[in-house]
Amino acid sequence: MSGATTPAPGRLDTVRRFVNTLDIDSATDALTTPGELEDWLRSASLLAGATSVGPDDLARAVVVREALRSALTANHGGDPIPAGALAVLNDAAARARLTATLTARDGWRPRPAAGGVDGALGGLLALVGDAMADGTWARLKICVNDTCQWAFYDESRARSGKWCSMQVCGNRAKQRAWRDRKAESTT
């Protein structure tokens, strides 16, 4: 992680934390074994009961994580979710048997009918659906610093945040731009 970020509101922070299980800046991945995935899903209250997690579950979870990262990158410009990421997320939703449930206060909300890891991943996607419905999804973004790509919640008034941290990644980008301008002016 290049810079510290403020948590996203409510359960959307679970999605942010899931994407950030891969720390590109420090080259660490918190999801390298089925046991690590199981522990993470349990700590996020997405997996309950006696569920065994296998290598195929881990592979699907990592693919979903990277599809979410791609979807969050699209939030910078309000672009549609890229087709590849959309296909992965729709496949995960189908495996989770995600269905719309009417709630007393919030209207229709997506909920997984499947159990196990597929249901847990569906629970993550349900959180995305909830965030889309309440308007917070568009503020969850990926740092534009290619060596960072940390998920962060954009709290800027104009909703134009680019970096997970202005003090770290933003400062690096501005210094790089200054050096480039200075190099151009001397040639």
Image (cartoon, rainbow, N blue to C red):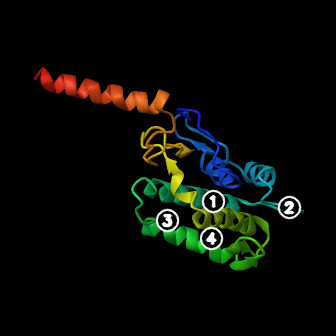
Residue at which label 3 appears: 85
C-alpha separation, residue under disc 2 versus residue under disc 3: 27 Å
Residue at which label 2 appears: 48
Which of 162/42 is in front? 162
Q: Are marks 1 and 4 in contact (CB under 8 Å)?
A: no
Secondary structure under badge 4? helix
Kindly identify the amino acid type of the residue bearing the numbered disc 1. Ala
Q: Give the foreground label among 2 and 1.
A: 2
Residue 134 numbered tag: none
C-alpha separation, residue under disc 2 versus residue under disc 1: 20 Å
Instruction: Where is residue 70? Give x, y as percent.
Output: 48, 57
Which mark sits nearer the N-terminus, 4 or 2? Answer: 2
Categorize mark 1 by other alpha carbons within 10 Å: few (<14), some (14-19), many (20+): some
Kindly identify the amino acid type of the residue bearing the numbered disc 2. Ala
Categorize mark 3 by other alpha carbons within 10 Å: few (<14), some (14-19), many (20+): some
Q: Quadrant of residue 1?
A: top right
Residue at far top of view: 186
Instruction: Where is residue 84? Give x, y as percent.
Output: 46, 67
Residue 92 numbered tag: 4
Residue at which label 1 appears: 59
In the drawing, does residue 1 fall left or right of residue 157?
right
